[in-house]
Image (spheres, rainbow, N blue to C red):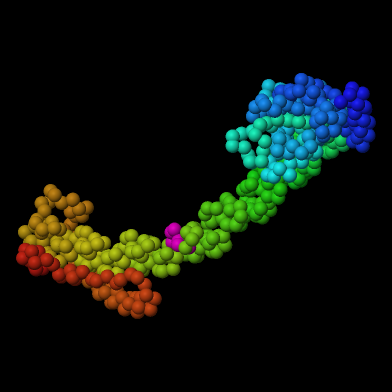
Amino acid sequence: MSNRKMVLGREVCLIIFLVFTTIRSEENLALSKAASQSSDIGNGRWPASGAVDGCEETDVFSDCCSHTDIRVSKTAWWRVDLGQISTIDTIRIVYRDNFQQRLAGYQLYVSNTTTLPTDGVLCYEDTSSTNSSVQLVVTHQCPYVGRYVTVYNYRNNPKRYNWYSDDALLELCEVQVFGCPVGMYGNGDCNQVCPASCYGRNCNSKTGSCIYCIQGKYGNTCENDCSTNCKDSLCSNESGFCFECIHGKFGNACDQVCSVSCKEGFCAKDTGYCHGCVDGKFGNSCGQQCSVNCKDRLCAKYTGYCNNECIIGKHGENCDQDCSVNCRDRCTRDNATCIECITGKHGETCDKDCPMNCENNVCVRTTGLCNGCIAGRYGVTCSLTCPVTCKDFICNQQTGHCLDCYPGKYGVVCGADCPDKCTDNICSKDNGRCLTTGSRNTEQSSADSNMIIIAVLATVCGLQLAALITTVIYHLRYRQKRKNSSNTGTDIKEEQSVPDTGYTSISPRQEETSHVYEMVVT
Ligand SMILES: *[C@@H]1O[C@H](CO)[C@@H](O)[C@H](O)[C@H]1NC(C)=O
């Protein structure tokens, strides 16, 4: 090939290149830049620069392609230094005709360093599965910022596909890198400056739109400010929607105010729903009032059910039902059981009357038994009559035994007479033994004994009459009550009279020692 022919070939290439660049909107940043490759062949006939000379001839014997050594190794690379950090858009490759098996498997890297051929970011890798699908003239999107572009190839053992060449080598006839120096853009000449709000002053080399915005900006050229309601002034580059809102705001642009009823003013960015409600409110946006019947007006955020207890006098899931009027204050929330009853009542809901002879009309809420009896009565429901012989008509509430006897009498029901020989006719209530005057301690002990005896006789007569009346009344009531209880089904069983209720009935031992003497006035 003559020198002349070669020069002519180069001129033809240059013309093609000029035509080509006028229809591109960006510069070919690689044209005539410094290029290097992993090895040379043919004494410089196919240098790395052959791929940046503007000649796209695909016959290597036209002498405007690059070519690495065929004998060398399992890796090969070719690289161009763009001279400065640049915003790359696309990379176009023109490879030697009919050598798909050699190009197959190649990779494209963009980097700022050249320590390894694979430095930087991988923007393309060929994985074509058939020889014919490897494109020899092809353009790849490679939207990265960097200074070096490297074409790299390798051959593993085994190879990815059988049809791959055994050795790695590159025969690039042209490599074009389209883009602009970083910070610039423009139609063919990269003479426009990227907008100042572009992050890193870096913009799309064709359109000039920012790739990222600096913090607090959004829009094509990052000309808009993110809302001041965006947390940390961060918003989407495209839409301007906040990623998060500042406290108390919601909505895409965080321009809506969370409900004042939201706990601590927090609500969800998308819905405005509160995370929690202030006391006394419920609902998604906490717009509803908890029932006045909830204690402290506290209720569940979603259901509105009272959180804890009801106010006094109410029960039910929503505390909207009244406790029984017979409850004293409260009843349980779930089953309306009274905690305490009003006087005279008992039962779960205090609907039953206490036995009539309970002291102060008070009985145990759960059992209905009396705490104490009125005078003259004994038994758990105070339905039994104390022996009339008991002093002051008072007997033990459990046993019915007299607590004390009148002078001259002794025994559990005071049915026996003290022995005659006892001074002043006074004897021990328990065993009938005479008590010495010295041991007497009643108030009347030193008074006129005649008067005492008369008084005792009068009292005994009176008590006998009273007992008769009481017994009659008792039996009448007892019948009445039996009738009632069989009607109402009350759970209190009528108690059985103890056998020694009668005032003449005494234990055998007492009978032995007893003397039925009329008292003698001395
Ligand atoms: C090269 O450096 C520029 C500026 O520092 C940076 O933006 C870019 O991401 C770097 N490129 C690579 C591939 O590391």
Which residue lies at the image location 43% right of the left edge and 59% below the top edge?
340
Q: Is residue 150 magenta?
A: no
Drawn side of residue 225 relative to residue 367, left or right: right
Which of the 4 image quadrants contains residue 155? top right
Q: Is residue 441 visible?
A: yes
Drawn side of residue 391 relative to residue 284, left or right: left
Q: Main structural element of the magenta stretch: helix, strand or loop?
A: loop
Which residue lies at the image location 24% right of the left edge and 62% below the top edge?
398
Q: Is residue 110 above or below residue 502?
A: above
Which residue lies at the image location 64% right of the left edge and 29% below the top edge?
74
Which of the 4 image quadrants contains residue 408? bottom left
Q: Is residue 186 visible?
A: no
Q: Nearer the viewer, residue 178 or 331?
A: 178
Which of the 4 image quadrants contains residue 454? bottom left
Drawn side of residue 460 relative to residue 233, left or right: left
Residue 68 in the image, given as x and y percentages of width and height: 73, 26
Which residue lies at the image location 68% right of the left edge and 46% below the top edge?
268
Q: Quick one: which residue is furthest to the front in this view?
A: 1
Residue range highlighted in magenta:
336-341
Q: Is residue 395 above or below residue 287?
A: below
Q: Nearer the viewer, residue 215 or 368?
A: 215
Quadrant position of the N terminus in the picture: top right
Drawn side of residue 365 relative to residue 313, left or right: left
Residue 135 in the image, given as x and y percentages of width and height: 77, 41
Quadrant position of the C terminus in the picture: bottom left
Q: Is residue 338 magenta?
A: yes
Residue 214 in the image, given as x and y percentages of width and height: 78, 31
